[in-house]
Image: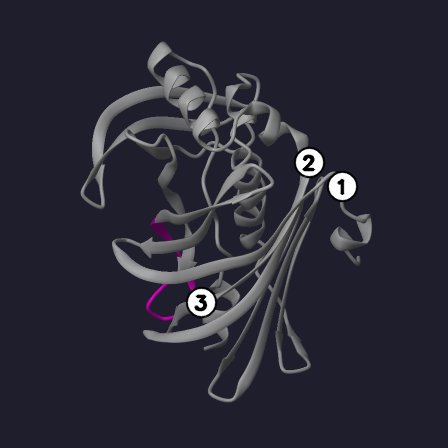
């Protein structure tokens, strides 16, 4: 059980894209318009939201709550709270520039976290950058190529293959061909294996139930699969799009 807590990773959403060919550029520009347009997407540099749902713990669906805060260019805080066999668990992941930290508490006891979780937190920062969509056209941050269309939940989706410059990890993005919205992302990552220890998995994130917040289309439901099996379902609420956030949100104790 202790190994599972160390292997728990937070919800990672989306990935980045840059102009690498005409097909990819056209798909991203359509997505920008579908999500509210460049002006609306660029207006806000920070965001906050709360979440709740279920996550698989040792094969059992376990309820959780949490919250997320993000501020450009590279600050992220994510908290997940749950209870397993009467034990209250808190997982806090923070990125602030080059500093990254994950803290796992079981009751009042801090459980030492494994170093390899830091790459997943950094990858989460990239995902939050990408949710703004307009940074996806920055070729200094991402390389991209178009791919064949695919089916997502019975509907056709345009696909782009992305490699962020900051982390050498290929990502596939799926945009609904009719609406232009980002409906799925897939990439290799880390997750708790059958015994709880972190293992490599292929993560697929499905985005749905879009809601307009300050002119921006935001997904309020995310379903995560690990190697084709449901791992987490989360609904988000209390969305705030902001000019900035207090730096205390992202403080990291040495």
Residue tagged 1: 244
Q: Earlier in the sequence, mark 1 or mark 2?
A: 2
Q: Residue 51 location in percent, x, y?
A: 53, 62
Q: Is residue 223 magenta?
A: no
Q: Residue 69 location in percent, x, y?
A: 65, 51
Q: Residue 165 location in percent, x, y?
A: 53, 26
Label 1: element kind: loop
Residue tagged 2: 45
Q: Is residue 67 left or right of residue 75?
A: left
Q: Give residue 87's quadrant in the image.
A: bottom right
**Residue segment shown in magenta:** 193-203
**C-alpha span from label 2 to label 3:** 27 Å
Label 3: element kind: strand
Q: Residue most toward the top? A: 22
Residue tagged 3: 53
The answer to whether one can see residue 245 in this image is: yes
**At x 46% / y 87%, what residue is drawn?**
85
Q: Is residue 139 above or below residue 108?
A: above
Q: Assess whether mark 2 and mark 1 are in contact (beta carbons under 8 angstroms).
A: yes
Q: Earlier in the sequence, mark 1 or mark 3?
A: 3
Q: Give residue 185's quadrant in the image.
A: top left
Q: Is residue 108 above or below residue 114?
A: below
């Amino acid at each position: 059980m202790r190994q599972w807590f160390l292997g728990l990773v937070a919800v990672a959403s989306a990935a980045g894209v840059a102009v690498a060919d005409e097909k990819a550029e056209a798909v991203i520009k359509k997505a920008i318009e579908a999500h509210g347009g460049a002006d609306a997407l660029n207006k806000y540099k920070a965001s906050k939201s709360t979440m709740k749902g279920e996550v698989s713990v040792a094969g059992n669906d376990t309820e959780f709550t949490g919250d997320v805060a993000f501020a450009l260019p590279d600050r992220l805080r994510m908290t997940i709270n749950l209870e397993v066999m009467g034990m209250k668990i808190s997982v806090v992941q923070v990125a602030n520039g080059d500093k990254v930290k994950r803290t796992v508490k079981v009751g009042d006891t801090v459980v030492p976290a494994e170093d390899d979780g830091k790459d997943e937190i950094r990858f989460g920062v990239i995902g939050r950058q990408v949710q703004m969509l307009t940074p996806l056209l920055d070729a200094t941050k991402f390389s991209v190529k178009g791919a064949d269309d695919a089916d997502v939940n019975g509907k056709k989706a345009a696909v782009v293959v992305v490699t962020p410059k900051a982390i050498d990890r290929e990502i596939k993005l799926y945009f609904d061909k009719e609406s232009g919205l980002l409906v799925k992302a897939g990439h290799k990552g880390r997750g708790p294996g059958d015994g709880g220890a972190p293992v490599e998995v292929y993560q697929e994130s499905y985005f749905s139930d879009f809601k307009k917040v300050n002119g921006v289309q935001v997904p309020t439901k995310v379903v995560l699969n690990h190697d084709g099996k449901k791992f987490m379902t989360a609904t988000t609420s209390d969305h705030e799009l902001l000019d900035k956030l207090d730096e205390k949100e992202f403080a990291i104790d040495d």
